[in-house]
Amino acid sequence: MDLRLDRLRVEIDGSEILRGLSLDVPSGRVVGLVGPNGSGKSTALRCVYRALRPSGGTVWLDGDDLSAMPLRESARSVAALTQESGSDLDFTVAETVALGRTPHLRGNQPLSAREHELCRRAMELMDVAHLADRGVLGLSGGERRRVLVARALAQEPRVLVLDEPTNHLDVRHQVELLSLLRTTGTTVLVVLHDLNLAAAACDRIGVLAEGALVAAGTPREVLTTELVREVFGVDAAVVDHPLTGDPQLLYRLAPRPVSP
């Protein structure tokens, strides 16, 4: 499913958070959004999973206006993991993952055998199957994050929207999650702060600054020394990863002060 952000504008309390953002996310591709804090990345995602109605512009799903679709219909197509995802209720892990099937069910309709299998596979993919009977409130931040990704996968979305999905994850689970995104065939729009992870995981990257798109292209096209200095205000050398060939950034830190 193709996703297109078409001249999106968001104005909140007189401040323009997004300024005419246009970005294509081709079907089956992983597209990353990067940028400094406050550049509008999470706001753009909120327009896609319909937590926020844009002040102008359109989100298109395969040529259909997202805002014109019934909520249940769009929820069957778009699954989201937000920075604030969580629960105050101590559901078990299995119950939480099963909530991903809600858009596909009517009333108190029980899960079918196929849906139970979907949930089981999602938990295995995210390495939380052994936690199935545990309450989510008793889990670590990283474990809970993986449970919520499993819930999104169980939804069988055609578009997956992820806001900082690697938060709280250890290195192994960061690598496994981002590797998974490249193999599902699902259209993915993901916000990442770590530029090196974005370069490794994404087919294309859009760079936001002050609510506007300043660059878009492949990681190698976008992540240049000049752009990183201009947008992020840091000096970095761009080198090839010795194992994958992906561009990677080596940052220069300020020198330590010399003691008198």
Image: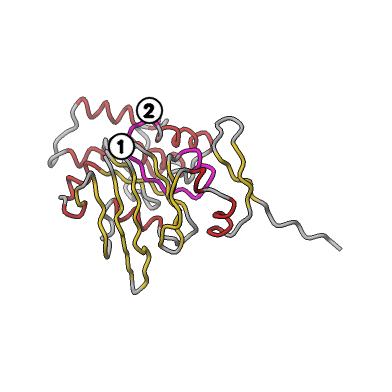
- Dividing the picture into quarters, in which one does residue 53 lie? bottom left
Seen in the image, is 117 located left or right of residue 137?
Answer: left
Magenta span contains residue 220: no
> Magenta span covers which residues?
183-201
- Identity of the residue drawn at 29% across and 55% down: 6
Q: Nearer the viewer, residue 143 or 22?
A: 22
Q: Secondary structure at mark 2?
A: helix
- Identity of the residue drawn at 40% across and 46% down: 190
Residue 12's label in the rendered image is none
The numbered mark, 1 or 2, whose residue comes first in the sequence reads 1
Residue 197 x %, y % = 51, 42
Q: Is residue 108 above or below residue 85?
A: above
Q: Is residue 7 above or below residue 113?
A: below
Q: Residue furthest bottom?
A: 14
- Identity of the residue drawn at 50% across and 48% down: 222
Q: Quadrant of the C terminus?
A: bottom right
Would you name the residue on which mark 2 appears? 124
Q: Secondary structure at mark 1?
A: helix
Q: Is residue 93 above or below residue 20?
A: above
Q: Nearer the viewer, residue 54 or 100?
A: 54
CB within 8 Å, label 1 to label 2: no
Residue 19 x %, y % = 36, 64
Residue 160 x %, y % = 32, 42
Q: How is the image coloured?
A: secondary structure
Q: Quadrant of the N terminus?
A: top left
Identity, as a three-letter code, of the amino acid under mark 1 = Val
Residue 20 x %, y % = 34, 62
Q: Residue furthest right?
A: 260
Residue 97's label in the rendered image is 1
Magenta span contains residue 199: yes
- As measured in the structure, the alpha-carbon distance from the residue carrying label 1 to the one carrying label 2 is 11 Å
Identity, as a three-letter code, of the amino acid under mark 2 = Glu
